[in-house]
Amino acid sequence: MKFRPLSSKGDPGTRQRSFGFLLRFVLFLVVFYFLVAAKPVNDHVIVPFTGWIASASGTVLNALGEKATVQGTEIHSGSFGVNIENGCNGVETALLLAAAVLAFPASWRHRLTGFLLGFLGIQVLNLIRVVSLVWIGRHRPALFDSSHTVIWQSAVVLFGVLIFLFWASRQRPRPANAEEKAGR
Amino acid sequence: MFDSRAALRLLIGFLLALAFWFLFASAYERVLAPAAEFLIRLGESPAVTRLEAPGKEFLVKRADFPPGAPYPGLPSPDLHFNFVLLGALFALPPRPWRQRNVTRFRLAALCLFVVHVVFLVFQVESVYANNFREWSAAHYSAFARNFWGAGFHFYQIAGRFAAPFAIWWFFGRSEPLEPAAEQARGPRRKKKRSKV
C-alpha cells in the first residue's frame, strides 16, 4: 500500500469527498454511541459479550498456567482482580471501524466483509490485551495503569484504524455520477 | 498490503509519541486545567470553580465547598492519552519529518488540545450535574444532567478514539488509496517517442 499525501491545494472534489466522509463518520459514530449506550442494548448485548471475552480470557490464562477464575465480567488471578468494562471490550474500536466503513464509499458486500474481518481481528488483539493485562496486574502491578490505558488502548485503536485504511485502499472508487445518485 | 516500512514508521511514531506523552503529560495538564477553568467560570455566577493539576488527576476545587470537604479528583490520562494515536498516525507517510507534515501535525495537535479542553469542561460539569445528589438536582435540570453526562460518556466510549483519527483525516491524511486511483485512471499508456 502506497501513501500519497493529500494536498491541501488538491482538487475541490477530493476535499469535498474527504469532508463528506468525515461528516458521515461522525454522524454514524453518534448513532452507534446512542445504540450501545441504551440500557437494553447494554444489558442484553454488551454485558453478555463482555462476559464472553472474560470467559475466553480466563480459558487462555488457565491454559498458560495462571489459575484464573471468571465471574461475569470479572477475572481473578491470585490476589489480582479486574473487571472488564466498556472501553476494554474492543467494542469502542469496533464502533470506530463500523462508522468509518459505513462512511466510506464502497459496496455493501465489501463493507460487511471489511467490518466482520476487522471485528474479528480487533477481538483477537483485545483478547491478547486482556490476557496480558491480567498477567501484568498480577506479576508487574506497577506497570498496570500505563499499560492498561495508554499503551494497549492506543494499540487496539490504532490497529482498528489500520484495518480501515487497508480495507479502504482496496476499494474501487465509484464513478462520480454514481456517488451523486447515491446521495439523492 | 501495508508495507513493512509503513509499519516501522508507525511503530517508531507510536513509541516517540508515547515517550513524549510520558515526559510532558504533567506539564500539559497544567496548561489544560486553567483553559478549562476559564471556560467553566464563564458560565458561573459567582465564578467559584478552580481546577488544579497536581499530576495524574485534575482536582476540582470550588470556593463554595464546605470547609474540609474532599475535592473530587478526575483521572487525567484518560482525557489526553489519545495524543499518542495522533502522533503515530502522523508518522505514517514516507518522510514524516517533512516541513508540511510537521506543520499539519502542529495544527492537528492544537485541535486536539481544544478537544481536550472542551471535554474536560464536560467532565467537570458532568460531576457537578450528577455526583452531588440534592445539590446537583437543585442546580441542574434533567436535560442539563443528561447533556453533560452523555457528552462526557460519548467522549469516553467513542470520542477520545475518534478525535485523533478525524483530526488526522482532516489535516494530515496520506491517502492510502493509490491502487484504487490507479484503477480509476485505467492502464497507463507508454508515451510514444517521435523519432527525429
Image: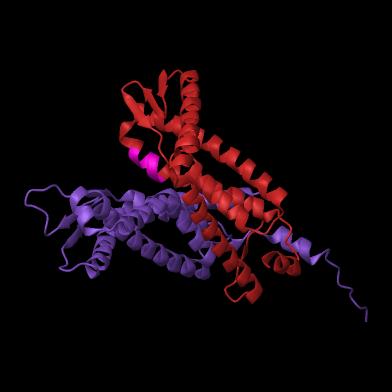
Chain colours: A red, B purple
- The image quarter containing residue A6 is bottom right
Q: Is residue B19 left or right of residue A184?
A: left
**In the rendered image, is residue B116 in sight?**
yes
Q: Which residues are magenta?
A: A145-150
Front in this rendered view, residue A60 or A116: A116
Q: Is residue B86 left or right of residue A168?
A: left
Front in this rendered view, residue B66 or B116: B66
**Going 70% across and 64% down the picture, which residue do you hit?**
A182
Q: Residue A12: x percent and y percent?
A: 63, 76
Q: Residue furthest bottom?
A: B196
Q: Is residue B27 left or right of residue A125?
A: left
Q: Is residue A26 left or right of residue B110?
A: right
**In the rendered image, is residue B172 in sight?**
no
**Going 48% across and 38% down the picture, which residue do you hit?**
A46
Q: Residue B19: x percent and y percent?
A: 38, 50
Front in this rendered view, residue A143 or A61: A61
**Going 69% across and 56% down the picture, which residue do you hit?**
A106
B57 vs A132: above or below: below
**Going 12% across and 60% down the picture, which residue do you hit?**
B63
Q: Main secondary structure of the magenta part?
A: helix
Total labels: the figure holds 0
Q: Residue furthest right?
A: B195
Q: Residue B153: x percent and y percent?
A: 38, 50
Q: Residue furthest left?
A: B67
B182 vs A128: above or below: below
Magenta stretch contains residue A36: no
Magenta stretch contains residue A147: yes
Front in this rendered view, residue A84 or B6: A84
Q: Residue A47: x percent and y percent?
A: 45, 35
Quadrant position of the C terminus of chain B in the picture: bottom right
